[in-house]
Image (cartoon, helix red, strand yellow):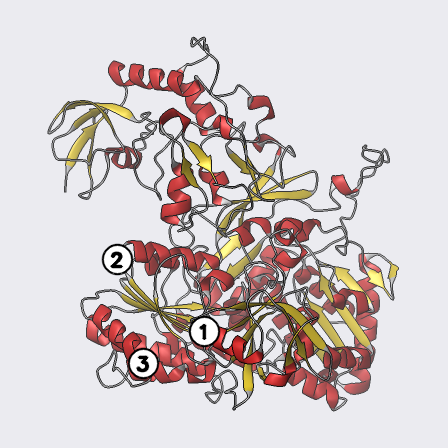
Amino acid sequence: MPKLLIDGRSIEVPPGTKVIQAAEELGIHIPRLCYHPALGSAGACRLCAVSFLDGPVKGLLMSCMVEARDGMVVSTQHPDAVGFRKQVMEWLMMNHPHDCPVCDEGGHCVLQEMTVAGGHSMRRYPAAKRTYLDQDLGPLIQHEMNRCIHCWRCKRFYQEYSGYRDLGALGLASRTYFGKATEGPLESPFSGNLIDICPTGVFTDKPSRFRGRRWDYERAPSICIHCSLGCNTVANARYREVLKIEARHNPDVNGYFICDRGRYGFDYANHPQRPRKPLLDARDCSFEEAIREAGARLQKVIQESGPESVALVGSPRGSLESLGAMRLFCDTQALEGPTFWMDRESMECARILLGGEAEDLILSLSGLEEADCILVVGLDPLQEAPMLALALRQAWRKGAWVGLIDPRGVELPFPFNRLAVHPPELPGPLESFSQESGYGLVGPQLGGFGEEWLRALEPSNRPAVVWGRTAGGVASLRKCMDLVRGLRQKKGWGGLFPVLAGANSLGAAAVAGEDVRSWKELLDRARKGGLRAMILVETDPFFAFPNQAELRRMLDSLELLVVMDYIPSEAVRVAQVVIPSTTIFESPGLFINQEGRLQEAKALHAGGIPLAQELKNGHPSREFSLEIPGGSSQPAWRALAGLSETMGRSMGFFGIQALRSILEERFPWLRAARTGQRILPMELQQERECLAEVASGVQPVQGELALLMVQATFGTEELSSYSRPALKMEREPTGFLHPQTASLLGVKAGDRIRLEWEQGELELTLMTKEHMVGDLLAVQAHRALAWEKVGSLPGSLKFEQVRKSG
């Protein structure tokens, strides 16, 4: 390993390490504008110049371009290096506009910091400054090209790192322009990262434009809860309003970046119709009155019909504290449950991943980037968990083979192999891959895909399997686990990367009891008249349950519906008692992501109605009060504790630390867990009855189409559907068919089609994809589409039920 001296301090680094990285490990910061750890070296800004005094090379060189070598003696403060960097700063500022007072980057601008640090204050160049025209890049990114210093970070991230081509470098030399050939919204679902990586103010956040400076914001580390990956973020708020989200570096999870859904899905916390006051029979009341009346009505139901007549329902978007409090509430009040999942198979998949079956098979996102042969099963990464698609691209850039088995025409930002099969058929290829050879046989149904898999697997040292819930259930998950075990036996290494439906699915599975039920099982009980009251905690069944008519009948049959939530859902509108709860930005919370990593989101601010929504004639209210307007929301766990207290049985806590202590006693695995670390599966193993292995999906018959509801980056995820910036990125509801199937039906790409049922009809835009299975209709479960009319899912359609509109 090379050993070198930097500013009189010795360090030994791995071969291939750049001098700028070696200095960083010593805590020596060398100025830079173009270098970024995730993007590597470019040598474009010339600001990282250092003096090499002795060793293999000598003179003034760029530290980001020179690899550390044995015997090097480097000085970052040599007069030649300092003088050169001052000249570079003067060159860069020759054309830069002095608009710091109106630039949103001001206060955390790298160029601003380098200019001050370099001592530059006077422009000596007398000629006119170079100027550009700005472009409209859509509703998320503001473009100010005059501020560009040609570091090339934007082009390198957008094209090389994320794999999109609609933004890049145009022109030559000092007239190089970074933008699009024709202006318009950016195509990449990772475009918001341009804001974070730009060292100046060329790309800034449009939704928060002119709303505050870095020093104006309340800031706190947080977690993205828009999918199960648990990317790390920094949340920013001002005047009781969450204004923007930034990526927070975590080398094990999301690295330096996040997707646009995670960046712009936050605005549900500011929704104008968000429940902020407790409601009792549609009238405003105090928090205490709502809790007291809900407790009295629940006690009456329990006394008359027993605890089995009350159901407590949550969802995987709740924090571990809220989910754990639900478990404690059920134990304290002798209720069954709680219920966390729509269907039992999703619940069982989460349990399998937590139990001893998963062993130590599960990979982190950063571990997946190092895999060299990756099989993706039953998943559309770009739509369901976008940062997974970015990780797969990084593996591909390092030479990995990527193959995908899925019925849909999945798109990824890099070339990959694919095999289109129906969901019920997914276990078949996996069985073929994991038979006697341990890692693969080429069955007749696999054809060239199987041959490509074996060819890529032969020289592979780090194979991995990615499993998704959307098009595969318990059967495909177990087959994937068997395949990974076979890979480990043959290769000595193998990993599984699962993707689940909610941010805290594993947290829900970890606290669920033996008597946990699914939504479908609750419906069965309600049909028999065995359900009289229900408490919904941070869940909206109207958003996800596939049969709203039946759901409404069930809720209408209840004597009492209590809802604790922070979004203006349909459930809130029909409830007798509404208790507003706090969001992830207003109360701290623990989450366990899909790989079993325990992470914490810190409280950002106290919440309340955003000041911008209270302005009268452009001025805040002149009424003074000690209370925060709209500040009645309470954490769901605190509301449950108060509710249990009014029902005569204390849960033993009212503060979050006391709750966490009780949860540690109730769940011993939590006592040993550390924030930021993974929870070992064996610590969570519980004895549970195992479900029969049932393959997901419906196999269509002649003259029918299998119907599969699928996800989209924007428009199908619950929380971001209440966010104004995310709404601007939604596309109209779309259905997907194979071109030959579309031709048989007499329709083509771009047509409006109508799907007809007895319950009603759906109208959507048709797109065709060559690589999907022929007898499948994939429909986005879009918020603007009343897809709940489908009834039971997954299902099928006869050809005559699909018609061209108009």
What residue does disc 3 label? 446
Query: Residue at image x 44%, y 70%?
Result: 770
Residue 322 figure quarter: bottom right
| Type of amino acid at the residue the image marks with label 2 | Gly
**Residue 9 place in picture, x, y as percent:** 22, 28
| Type of amino acid at the residue the image marks with label 1 | Met
Depth order, front residue of 103/596: 103
What residue does disc 2 label? 399
Depth order, front residue of 736/585: 736
* Mark sitting earlier along the chain (3/2): 2
Query: Residue at image x 68%, y 43%?
Result: 241
Q: CA distance from mark 3 to mark 1?
A: 15 Å
* Mark sitting earlier along the chain (2/1): 2
Q: CA distance from mark 3 to mark 2?
A: 23 Å
Point out the frontmost of discs 3 and 1.
1
Depth order, front residue of 757/315: 757
**Residue 679 place in picture, x, y as percent:** 42, 64
* Mark sitting earlier along the chain (3/1): 3
Q: CA distance from mark 2 to mark 1?
A: 26 Å
- Label number found at residue 772: 1
**Vertical relation: 108 (above or below) 359:** above
